[in-house]
């Protein structure tokens, strides 16, 4: 079997590492990994690891890459390869939140009123 040592393999190796100790947050580590591994990537391939920046569970991002978007347990805003029950619960919360915000927007709420810190 031929090992893949291309940019995608290097990117995955760095992205899925745990951040080093010394005060690095996960976000800072992902930004560092992004800058280090996307250099010279001219493949035009979408970096699926962006799901980590969107707060998708890492096991689902890795599963999507490893299974090439196949063999998932369920789907919603993303394809689930890890904890299906937890994902379905989160999908339901996202749906309810979207419904509430759409109703508020349609009833005349301004964007400034709808944008809240979580």
Image (cartoon, rainbow, N blue to C red):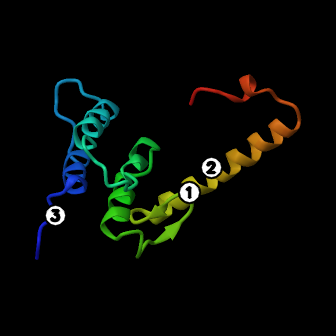
| Secondary structure of the residue carrying numbered label 1 | loop
Image-based side of 3 in relation to 108, left or right: left
Residue at x-position 44% and y-position 50%: 56
**At x 23% / y 43%, what residue is drawn?**
37
Give the camera-side residue of 71 and 42.
42
In the image, residue 43 lies at what x, y percent?
32, 55
Residue on which disc 3 sits: 4
Local SS, label 2: helix
Q: Quadrant of the C terminus?
A: top right
Q: Nearer the viewer, mark 1 or mark 2?
A: 1
- Residue found 53% across the figure and 66% down from its top: 75
Asked if 18 appears above or below 27 in the picture, the reply is below
Q: Position of residue 28 (x, y in %)?
A: 30, 30
CB-based contact (under 8 Å), mark 3 and mark 1 = no
Quadrant of the snapshot with the N terminus: bottom left
Marks 1 and 2: CB-CB under 8 Å?
A: yes
Label whose residue precedes the other's in the sequence (3 or 1)? 3
Q: Earlier in the sequence, mark 1 or mark 2?
A: 1
- Determine whether, in the image, residue 76 is placed left or right of residue 22: right
- Looking at the image, is 60 positioned above or below residue 118? below
Which residue of the protein is positioned furthest toward the front in this rendering? 42
Residue 94, numbered label:
2
Q: Position of residue 62 (x, y in %)?
A: 32, 59
Q: Are marks 2 and 3 in contact (CB under 8 Å)?
A: no
Image spot of residue 10 (x, y percent): 19, 51
Which residue has dot 1 on it? 77
Looking at the image, tell me whether mark 2 or mark 3 is earlier in sequence order.
Answer: 3
Q: CA distance from mark 2 to mark 3?
A: 37 Å
| Mark-to-mark CA distance, 3 and 1 | 29 Å
């Amino acid at each position: 079997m031929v090992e893949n040592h291309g940019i995608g393999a290097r990117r995955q190796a760095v992205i899925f590492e745990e951040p080093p100790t010394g005060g690095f947050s996960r976000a800072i580590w992902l930004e560092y990994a992004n800058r280090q591994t996307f250099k010279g990537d001219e493949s035009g391939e979408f970096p699926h690891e962006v799901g980590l920046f969107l707060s998708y569970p890492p096991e689902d991002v890795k599963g999507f890459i490893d299974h090439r978007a196949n063999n998932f347990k369920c789907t919603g805003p993303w394809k689930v390869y890890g904890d299906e029950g937890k994902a379905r619960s989160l999908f339901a919360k996202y749906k309810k939140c979207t419904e509430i915000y759409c109703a508020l927007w349609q009833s005349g709420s301004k964007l400034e009123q709808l944008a809240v810190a979580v």
